[in-house]
Image (spheres, coloured by chain):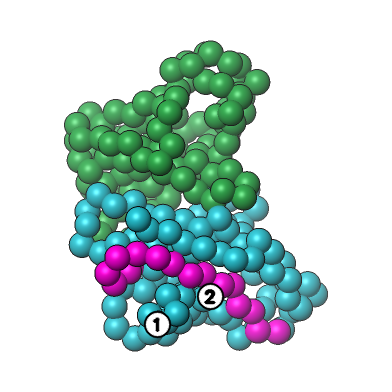
Chain colours: A cyan, B green
Amino acid sequence: AQSVAQPEDQVNVAEGNPLTVKCTYSVSGNPYLFWYVQYPNRGLQFLLKYITGDNLVKGSYGFEAEFNKSQTSFHLKKPSALVSDSALYFCAVRAPNSGNTPLVFGKGTRLSVIA
Amino acid sequence: EAQVTQNPRYLITVTGKKLTVTCSQNMNHEYMSWYRQDPGLGLRQIYYSMNVEVTDKGDVPEGYKVSRKEKRNFPLILESPSPNQTSLYFCASRTSLEQYFGPGTRLTVT
Protein backbone atom coordinates (compact mmCIF):
# COMPACT_ATOMS: atom_id res chain seq x y z
CA ALA A 1 0.00 0.00 0.00
CA GLN A 2 1.09 3.52 -0.68
CA SER A 3 1.85 5.92 2.13
CA VAL A 4 3.33 9.34 2.69
CA ALA A 5 4.94 10.73 5.81
CA GLN A 6 5.43 14.38 6.56
CA PRO A 7 7.36 14.21 9.83
CA GLU A 8 6.90 17.84 10.82
CA ASP A 9 3.51 19.25 11.70
CA GLN A 10 4.93 22.77 11.73
CA VAL A 11 7.96 24.45 10.20
CA ASN A 12 8.97 27.96 11.17
CA VAL A 13 11.47 29.94 9.14
CA ALA A 14 12.56 33.54 8.98
CA GLU A 15 11.82 35.51 5.85
CA GLY A 16 14.73 35.37 3.44
CA ASN A 17 16.07 32.11 4.82
CA PRO A 18 15.92 28.84 2.89
CA LEU A 19 13.08 26.51 3.73
CA THR A 20 12.65 22.75 3.56
CA VAL A 21 9.46 20.79 4.07
CA LYS A 22 10.14 17.09 4.38
CA CYS A 23 8.33 14.20 2.76
CA THR A 24 9.05 10.49 2.59
CA TYR A 25 6.99 7.92 0.78
CA SER A 26 6.36 4.24 0.38
CA VAL A 27 5.09 2.76 -2.89
CA SER A 28 5.77 -0.22 -5.10
CA GLY A 29 7.66 0.70 -8.18
CA ASN A 30 8.65 4.15 -9.32
CA PRO A 31 6.38 6.74 -7.77
CA TYR A 32 4.52 9.73 -9.06
CA LEU A 33 5.10 12.44 -6.45
CA PHE A 34 3.33 15.73 -5.93
CA TRP A 35 3.32 18.80 -3.74
CA TYR A 36 0.22 20.88 -3.13
CA VAL A 37 -0.25 24.06 -1.13
CA GLN A 38 -3.35 25.24 0.68
CA TYR A 39 -3.67 28.87 1.66
CA PRO A 40 -6.15 29.82 4.42
CA ASN A 41 -9.75 29.29 3.37
CA ARG A 42 -8.67 28.18 -0.08
CA GLY A 43 -8.54 24.93 -2.01
CA LEU A 44 -5.47 22.96 -2.92
CA GLN A 45 -3.13 24.37 -5.48
CA PHE A 46 -0.68 22.26 -7.43
CA LEU A 47 2.96 23.22 -6.90
CA LEU A 48 5.03 20.62 -8.69
CA LYS A 49 5.33 16.97 -9.58
CA TYR A 50 7.92 14.31 -10.25
CA ILE A 51 7.07 11.68 -12.80
CA THR A 52 10.38 10.73 -14.34
CA GLY A 53 13.63 12.30 -15.46
CA ASP A 54 15.67 14.89 -13.60
CA ASN A 55 15.56 14.38 -9.86
CA LEU A 56 15.32 18.12 -9.22
CA VAL A 57 11.91 19.42 -10.12
CA LYS A 58 11.04 23.09 -10.31
CA GLY A 59 7.54 24.33 -9.69
CA SER A 60 5.40 27.35 -9.03
CA TYR A 61 6.32 30.34 -6.84
CA GLY A 62 10.03 29.48 -6.82
CA PHE A 63 9.60 26.12 -5.12
CA GLU A 64 11.56 23.04 -6.06
CA ALA A 65 11.75 19.48 -4.83
CA GLU A 66 14.36 16.78 -5.06
CA PHE A 67 13.47 13.17 -5.66
CA ASN A 68 15.82 10.83 -3.81
CA LYS A 69 15.06 7.23 -4.62
CA SER A 70 17.51 5.68 -2.16
CA GLN A 71 16.06 7.67 0.71
CA THR A 72 12.49 7.51 -0.65
CA SER A 73 12.18 11.23 -0.09
CA PHE A 74 10.76 14.18 -1.98
CA HIS A 75 11.55 17.24 0.12
CA LEU A 76 10.16 20.62 -0.88
CA LYS A 77 12.61 23.51 -0.89
CA LYS A 78 12.84 27.19 -1.58
CA PRO A 79 16.06 29.23 -1.43
CA SER A 80 14.51 32.33 0.13
CA ALA A 81 11.23 32.20 2.02
CA LEU A 82 8.56 34.86 1.78
CA VAL A 83 5.91 35.69 4.36
CA SER A 84 3.35 34.93 1.65
CA ASP A 85 4.62 31.33 1.54
CA SER A 86 2.95 30.72 4.91
CA ALA A 87 0.42 27.97 4.23
CA LEU A 88 -0.32 24.29 4.64
CA TYR A 89 1.72 22.01 2.40
CA PHE A 90 0.78 18.50 1.36
CA CYS A 91 2.95 15.85 -0.20
CA ALA A 92 1.20 13.12 -2.19
CA VAL A 93 2.17 9.90 -3.95
CA ARG A 94 0.59 7.62 -6.49
CA ALA A 95 1.75 4.33 -7.92
CA PRO A 96 2.35 4.60 -11.66
CA ASN A 97 0.50 2.82 -14.41
CA SER A 98 -2.43 1.96 -12.21
CA GLY A 99 -5.48 3.89 -13.23
CA ASN A 100 -7.58 3.35 -10.16
CA THR A 101 -5.05 3.91 -7.42
CA PRO A 102 -5.74 7.05 -5.45
CA LEU A 103 -3.47 9.96 -4.80
CA VAL A 104 -2.41 9.36 -1.20
CA PHE A 105 -1.66 12.43 0.87
CA GLY A 106 0.50 13.12 3.86
CA LYS A 107 -1.02 14.79 6.88
CA GLY A 108 0.31 18.18 5.92
CA THR A 109 2.98 20.55 7.22
CA ARG A 110 2.11 24.06 8.26
CA LEU A 111 4.79 26.50 7.15
CA SER A 112 5.06 29.77 8.99
CA VAL A 113 7.41 32.39 7.57
CA ILE A 114 8.19 35.11 10.06
CA ALA A 115 9.10 38.62 8.96
CA GLU B 1 -10.83 27.84 -18.09
CA ALA B 2 -10.20 24.30 -16.87
CA GLN B 3 -11.80 23.90 -13.50
CA VAL B 4 -13.60 21.79 -10.95
CA THR B 5 -16.58 23.45 -9.31
CA GLN B 6 -18.37 22.51 -6.12
CA ASN B 7 -21.57 23.73 -4.55
CA PRO B 8 -22.33 24.83 -1.98
CA ARG B 9 -19.09 26.22 -0.60
CA TYR B 10 -20.43 26.36 2.93
CA LEU B 11 -23.21 24.33 4.47
CA ILE B 12 -24.56 24.07 8.00
CA THR B 13 -27.13 21.38 8.55
CA VAL B 14 -28.64 19.22 11.25
CA THR B 15 -28.18 15.56 11.99
CA GLY B 16 -30.19 13.32 9.71
CA LYS B 17 -31.15 15.83 7.05
CA LYS B 18 -30.14 14.50 3.65
CA LEU B 19 -27.82 16.68 1.62
CA THR B 20 -25.99 16.64 -1.69
CA VAL B 21 -22.78 18.41 -2.61
CA THR B 22 -22.44 18.84 -6.32
CA CYS B 23 -19.19 18.58 -8.28
CA SER B 24 -18.61 19.32 -11.92
CA GLN B 25 -15.52 19.38 -14.14
CA ASN B 26 -15.08 20.76 -17.64
CA MET B 27 -11.93 18.87 -18.64
CA ASN B 28 -13.55 15.65 -19.86
CA HIS B 29 -11.66 13.66 -17.24
CA GLU B 30 -12.72 10.10 -16.67
CA TYR B 31 -11.42 9.83 -13.11
CA MET B 32 -13.11 11.82 -10.36
CA SER B 33 -12.95 11.50 -6.61
CA TRP B 34 -14.04 12.96 -3.30
CA TYR B 35 -11.79 13.67 -0.33
CA ARG B 36 -12.38 14.94 3.13
CA GLN B 37 -9.81 16.99 4.98
CA ASP B 38 -9.56 16.89 8.74
CA PRO B 39 -6.90 18.51 10.94
CA GLY B 40 -3.96 16.21 11.56
CA LEU B 41 -5.29 13.61 9.13
CA GLY B 42 -4.60 15.22 5.80
CA LEU B 43 -6.86 14.34 2.89
CA ARG B 44 -8.56 10.98 2.80
CA GLN B 45 -10.36 9.61 -0.20
CA ILE B 46 -14.07 8.88 0.26
CA TYR B 47 -15.13 7.54 -3.15
CA TYR B 48 -13.80 7.58 -6.65
CA SER B 49 -15.14 6.98 -10.11
CA MET B 50 -13.16 5.78 -13.11
CA ASN B 51 -15.91 6.55 -15.59
CA VAL B 52 -19.65 6.93 -16.01
CA GLU B 53 -21.55 4.41 -13.90
CA VAL B 54 -18.30 3.11 -12.37
CA THR B 55 -17.75 4.05 -8.74
CA ASP B 56 -15.80 2.50 -5.90
CA LYS B 57 -15.03 3.06 -2.24
CA GLY B 58 -12.01 4.91 -1.05
CA ASP B 59 -10.55 4.83 2.43
CA VAL B 60 -13.46 6.37 4.36
CA PRO B 61 -16.73 5.63 2.50
CA GLU B 62 -19.04 5.00 5.47
CA GLY B 63 -21.99 7.37 5.54
CA TYR B 64 -21.52 8.60 1.98
CA LYS B 65 -22.92 7.79 -1.43
CA VAL B 66 -21.95 8.96 -4.88
CA SER B 67 -23.27 8.66 -8.39
CA ARG B 68 -21.76 9.16 -11.84
CA LYS B 69 -24.49 9.43 -14.42
CA GLU B 70 -22.61 11.89 -16.58
CA LYS B 71 -18.90 12.27 -17.15
CA ARG B 72 -18.72 15.83 -15.90
CA ASN B 73 -20.71 15.44 -12.66
CA PHE B 74 -19.93 13.51 -9.51
CA PRO B 75 -22.22 14.44 -6.62
CA LEU B 76 -21.57 13.43 -3.02
CA ILE B 77 -24.63 12.41 -1.07
CA LEU B 78 -25.01 12.22 2.68
CA GLU B 79 -28.26 10.37 3.32
CA SER B 80 -28.24 10.93 7.09
CA PRO B 81 -25.44 13.27 8.08
CA SER B 82 -23.91 12.98 11.52
CA PRO B 83 -21.66 15.38 13.45
CA ASN B 84 -18.56 13.26 12.69
CA GLN B 85 -19.04 14.18 9.04
CA THR B 86 -18.29 17.80 9.84
CA SER B 87 -15.30 18.40 7.61
CA LEU B 88 -13.88 20.16 4.57
CA TYR B 89 -14.68 18.27 1.39
CA PHE B 90 -12.84 18.40 -1.90
CA CYS B 91 -13.88 17.07 -5.25
CA ALA B 92 -11.12 16.29 -7.74
CA SER B 93 -10.71 15.12 -11.30
CA ARG B 94 -7.56 13.93 -12.92
CA THR B 95 -5.61 12.68 -15.86
CA SER B 96 -2.96 10.01 -15.39
CA LEU B 97 -0.46 12.67 -14.38
CA GLU B 98 -2.28 15.59 -12.79
CA GLN B 99 -5.11 16.04 -10.34
CA TYR B 100 -7.29 19.13 -10.16
CA PHE B 101 -9.21 20.09 -7.06
CA GLY B 102 -12.39 22.00 -6.52
CA PRO B 103 -12.48 24.95 -4.08
CA GLY B 104 -13.84 22.87 -1.22
CA THR B 105 -17.10 22.64 0.70
CA ARG B 106 -17.05 23.29 4.40
CA LEU B 107 -19.79 21.19 5.99
CA THR B 108 -20.94 21.54 9.57
CA VAL B 109 -23.41 19.01 10.97
CA THR B 110 -24.99 19.95 14.30
Residue B17 percent location from the top left of the image: 52, 13
Residue at image point 26% right, 56% down: B95
Front-lying residue, A57 or B102: A57
Closer to the camera in the image, B56 or B20: B56
Does B15 sit left or right of B5 as displayed? right
For the C terminus of chain A, the quadrant is: bottom right
Give the chain of mark 1.
A
Which badge, 1 or 2, is on the more N-terminal residue? Answer: 1
- Is residue B6 left or right of B41 when viewed as pictured? left
Q: Chain of mark 2?
A: A
Residue at 78%, 72% (x, y): give it: A114
Among all residues in the image, which is located at the extreme top? B16
Q: Residue B65 in the image: x percent, y percent?
A: 37, 26
Instruction: State the residue at coordinates (56%, 21%).
Output: B82
Question: Is B69 in the magenta?
Answer: no
Q: Quadrant of residue A30?
A: bottom left
Point out the stretch of residues depicted in magenta. A17-32
Asked whether the residues under marks 1 and 2 belong to the same chain, the reply is: yes
Q: For residue A76, which numbered disc appears in the image?
A: 2
Name the amino acid type tagged 1.
Ser
Q: Is residue B44 left or right of residue B3?
A: right
Regarding residue A95, the answer to whether it shows in the image is: yes
Q: Which structural element holds mark 1?
A: loop
Above or below, A36 relative to B72: below
> In the rendered view, would you say B79 is above or below A21?
above
Q: Residues within 10 Å of mark 2 (few under 14, many from 20)?
A: many
Element at label 2: strand
